[in-house]
Amino acid sequence: MEKSDRPKLQGVIYQYDKRSGITYAYENHPYIEKGTGKHKSKRKLIGRLDTDTNQIVATDGRRKNKKQRDAAEKTAAEKVRDTSPQDYKTLYETLLAKWTNLESRVSALESSVKDLKKNS
């Protein structure tokens, strides 16, 4: 049996994150780099290790599993669809009132700066 005919070994690697206290499980694919002959490995995230049951819980690597992420995206999409033109009108009027208030405050501050420059 030649070297190239051998099956590639793969395994599960556990890596502990000190910052979060979570142990992640990775699928390991070792290989030898062609040019240099160095042993390297490619890893793919499987999930996180549940400390109570010692089972691997699948995750997408963004601190949420796929079901939670899909549910969050679905609720966000529903919120966008549920906004009525009346809500936009109210939002516009509120922002316009804030803008005019801030604009008047800026002009008052500019005039007080001019007065301070004249007096000094």
Image (cartoon, rainbow, N blue to C red):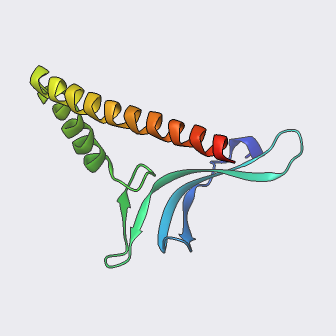
Q: Position of residue 66 (x, y in %)?
A: 31, 46
User: What residue lies at 62% left-to-right and 48% top-to-bottom?
Assistant: 7
Q: Position of residue 60 (x, y in %)?
A: 41, 49
Q: Quadrant of residue 81?
A: top left
* Residue reaching furthest to the top: 85
Q: Quadrant of residue 88?
A: top left
Residue 65, above or below 90: below
Q: Position of residue 103 (x, y in %)?
A: 40, 32
18, 6: nearer the viewer: 18
Residue 85, above or below 15: above
* Residue reaching furthest to the front: 119
Residue 90 visible to an observer of this rendering: yes
Residue 19, above or below 92: below
109, 82: nearer the viewer: 109
User: What residue lies at 74% left-to-right and 52% top-to-bottom?
Assistant: 40
User: What residue lies at 41% left-to-right and 39% top-to-bottom?
Assistant: 105
User: What residue lies at 28% left-to-right and 31% top-to-bottom?
Assistant: 95
Residue 2 visible to an observer of this rendering: no
1, 72: nearer the viewer: 72
57, 90: nearer the viewer: 90
